[in-house]
Amino acid sequence: MHFLIGGIQKTSLLDYPDKISAIVFTQGCNFNCGYCHNPRLLSSKLNEDICQPDVFLEFLKKRQGKLDGVVITGGESTLQPDIEAFITEIKSMNFLVKLDTNGYRPEVIEKLLSKNLIDYIAMDIKGPLDKYSLITRREIDTNKIKQSIDIIMNANIDYEFRTTVLPIQIQIEDFEKIGNLIKNAQKYYLQKFVVQSEINDKTLIKERNYTDEEFKTIINILRQYVQTVEIR
């Protein structure tokens, strides 16, 4: 099975809402965001043999009745050639599956959803569409982002959108554009930029966060468009 695992977390109470989950971190990403906290996962080449898919699946068999689900994150999970086969194995053990994605492979998201392989999906909204290439440091076809948003919002499963907020990249007025982009979405989470030692672009370490008052302004803007807006 061609499914590169860059790391695992055997138990999490936070990553799948209201569920106890295990987390699989996939290797490789098609974006290059400066604030990424897992830069070692950006390359599709493993520096070490972390965990083979069959080993993780054997671990899951022993966790039946103890875990509710599995979170598949990245890197970018939809890049894995055998993601469908991997999830099918997980679902055969009656685990729920949450998929984290940047939304740049809408065709993969749509296929997985059409086969009822996903129970919860979380998509990163990097910023307004006109700043996607700046934030991801890649040439971006923003139509793919819009397609994924549309697919997810019409999929009849639980979902959320989320944005890591870095003032140097996303100004307060940009949230009007984001609000319009995900208008009528169920849930949207703002994630404060947190400096960690493994940050991809260390020049961002000294960048400031928005103040609590500024976040209140942002939330008030977004609540015109989205049902639930919260800070994480």
Image (cartoon, rainbow, N blue to C red):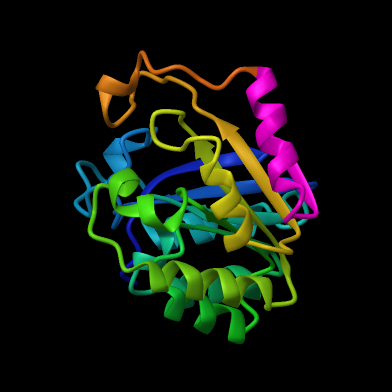
- Residue 155 position in % (x across, y down): 68, 77
Part of the protein shown in magenta:
212-231
Determine whether 115 is above or below 57 in the image: below
The one of 204 and 5 positioned closer to us in this rendering: 204
Q: Residue furthest top?
A: 206
- Residue 95 position in % (x across, y down): 69, 64
The one of 106 and 39 positioned closer to us in this rendering: 106
The quadrant of the picture occupied by the C terminus is top right
The quadrant of the picture occupied by the N terminus is bottom left
The one of 83 and 60 positioned closer to us in this rendering: 83
Residue shown at 67% from the left, 71% from the top: 153
Q: How many marks?
A: 0
Determine whether 206 is above or below 78 in the image: above
**Res 13 visible:** no
- Residue 36 position in % (x across, y down): 37, 36
The one of 31 and 98 positioned closer to us in this rendering: 31
Residue shown at 19% from the left, 51% from the top: 45
Q: Is residue 13 left or right of residue 109?
A: right
Determine whether 224 is above or below 219 in the image: below
**Res 69 visible:** yes
Q: Check if residue 227 falls in the magenta segment.
A: yes
Q: Is residue 152 left or right of residue 5?
A: right
Determine whether 163 is above or below 203 in the image: below
Q: Check if residue 103 falls in the magenta segment.
A: no
Residue shown at 38% from the left, 55% from the top: 130
